[in-house]
Amino acid sequence: MNKAPLGRLIGASLGPGDPQLITRRAWAALQSGARWLYPVKKAEESSYALGIVERGGLPVPADAEALVFPMTRDAIALARAWARAATRTVELLQEGRNLVFLVEGDASTFATFGHLARVVRELAPEVIVDTIPGVSSFAAAAASTDLTLAEEDETFAVIPAAYGVEVIDRLLDEFDTLVLLKVKPLIDEVLALLEKRDLLATSCFIEKVGSPDERIVHDVASLAGEKVNYLSLMLVQNPK
């Protein structure tokens, strides 16, 4: 007896916060009849990705389901959470219905979806995965702040700030523009480095870009000692 075909796993990139940045392809996937999955950090917690769609005017289906991806450095807890999420995803795919996983930003750029899809494929190699690209947070941030990431033969790099100030310092010698993602844990260290290199005036901080709570700070030195949001980044231009 042949097994029923699995549903398709669709990663729908929603952009960083503004529902108007959802692509037509992702919008169509959301309305295709596929079951929605969305990420949360804790059970019963709100989902940033789901909020983007809600602001766009789409009602949340009654059978939409949250998958928990905790914010922790505990490797064992993380592995268990990923295993639970992937197992549940495969269970739903075995019902034969497509699943659309809501992704803030772009699904291929520092996103949960890539890891989830990889683990799901380990459990069910025959599953078809469809990744819908979207607007990245740093592209939206550059547009919101009227900054250019690169022109002509200029170069830019995108890294998580968690790589540390030594790596950031080295990369500032190699690239014209540096995008530092998730600057929250190292904001004061990054500011000290920018001051040392006389780059405070050519840097800009952006928090929750595209959302109703978007915040743009050009006077980045004023952020010293502040606890900024996890969804924050910094654009550093390095004039030479």
Image (tube, rainbow, N blue to C red):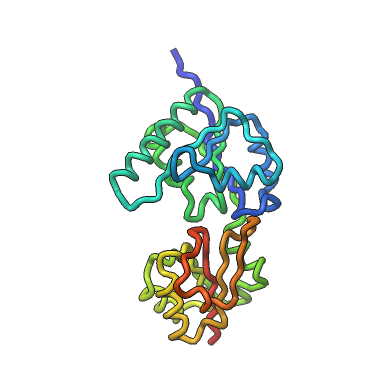
Asked whether, in this view, residue 35 is left or right of residue 67, the answer is right
Find residue 95 and report its horizontal and vertical position in percent: 50, 22
Q: Residue at x 42, y 46 (%)?
A: 115
Question: Looking at the image, which is closer to me, 8 or 77?
Answer: 77
Which image quadrant for residue 81?
top left
Asked whether, in this view, residue 76 is left or right of residue 176, the answer is left
Find residue 102 and report its horizontal and vertical position in percent: 56, 42
Question: Looking at the image, which is closer to me, 232 or 139?
Answer: 232
Instruction: Give the residue at the far left of this rendering.
Output: 76
In the image, is residue 3 above or below residue 63?
above
Find residue 216 and report its horizontal and vertical position in percent: 61, 68
Q: Residue at x 56, y 52 (%)?
A: 106
Q: Residue at x 64, y 58 (%)?
A: 210
In the image, is residue 39 above or below residue 166?
above
Question: Looking at the image, which is closer to me, 92 or 213?
Answer: 213
Asked whether, in this view, residue 194 is left or right of residue 219, the answer is left
How many labels sit on residues?
0
Q: Residue at x 45, y 18 (%)?
A: 3
Instruction: Give the residue at the far top of this rendering.
Output: 1
Find residue 184 and report its horizontal and vertical position in percent: 45, 64
Indicate the quadrant containing the N terminus: top left, top right, bottom left or bottom right. Answer: top left
